[in-house]
Image (tube, rainbow, N blue to C red):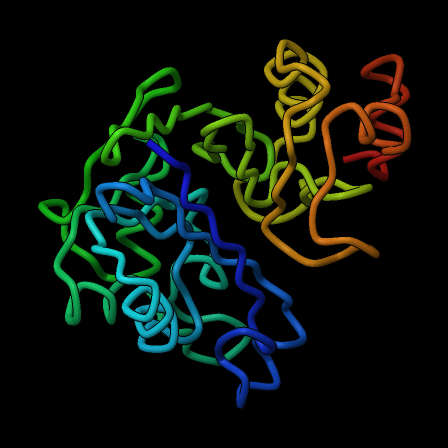
Amino acid sequence: MGLYLRQWLAGRDFATANEIAAQMANFVYAIGDSATRQCVLIDPAWDVDGLLDRLDADGMTLIGALATHYHPDHVGGGMFGLHVEGLPRLLEKRPVPIHVHADEGDGLRLVTGVSESDLVRHRGGDTLRVGGVDVQFLHTPGHTPGGQCFLAGGNLLAGDTLFVRGCGRVDLPGGDPEEMYRTLTQRLASLPDDIVLYPGHDYADRPNSTLGDERRDNLYLRVRSLDDWTRLMGGF
């Protein structure tokens, strides 16, 4: 078994003609088993055909899609008066299960228009087997109620929970600053320093980091108390 992991940046690696996609700087990930050639896509949006072309070029078979959370720049839907291509287009091209946290499923359906029958709802601690690779689901609320990260082969695919030198916003609908504080200081605290962080956006001077580096240099992981956190996040 060998881990297959690809990190693709909107506006550079796919959706190259979409200026908004380039401004949003979303990362989309493919993760799977290089031996069985099975994989899943994490947060496929903006240019589904371009993403599938990359999988096909690698000789990979798509068996599912994983959603970190329901915001349209990650799963498709309406945003700022624009339509973002995402999961509905994926289902047209490759009708695969969409894996989402149980608390995020209703929001995902509302934003994208997919059906309940398209979803597989998970809880934190669930594991999805992709070929010989185990992908563990971690419930990490704060940015949204059912936000989740995925842990596979020493890699944390964190969506908008944790960025390189940053973290997700808590002032959007569904955001909860206290839950985000607990996620960053408790739920992710048990993961070792050598875990490689792959964020949901390219917001820093590097595309990935380690949890050890982030614990040392990321201001949002160094807050000592909930009161300090509340002040840092603007009193929300």
Quarter assignment of residue 55: bottom left
Quarter occupied by the N terminus:
top left
* Residue shown at 33% from the left, 25% from the top: 134
* Residue shown at 75% from the left, 57% from the top: 203
Q: Nearer the viewer, residue 130 or 18?
A: 130
Residue 46: % across, % down: 44, 73
Q: Nearer the viewer, residue 175 or 89?
A: 89
Residue lying at the far bottom in this picture: please name it.
17
211 vs 74, left or right, is right
Residue lying at the far left in this picture: please name it.
117
Residue 78: % across, % down: 42, 71
Q: Nearer the viewer, residue 43 or 34?
A: 34
- Note whether 224 is above or below 38 in the view shown: above
Quarter occupied by the C terminus:
top right
Quarter assignment of residue 68: top left
1 vs 175, left or right, is left
* Residue shown at 85% from the left, 39% from the top: 234
Residue 124: % across, % down: 39, 19
193 vs 111, left or right, is right
- Note whether 137 is above or below 36 in the view shown: above
* Residue shown at 26% from the left, 57% from the top: 60
Residue 11: % across, % down: 59, 78
Please state the total of marks drawn on the protein image: 0
Quarter assignment of residue 116: top left
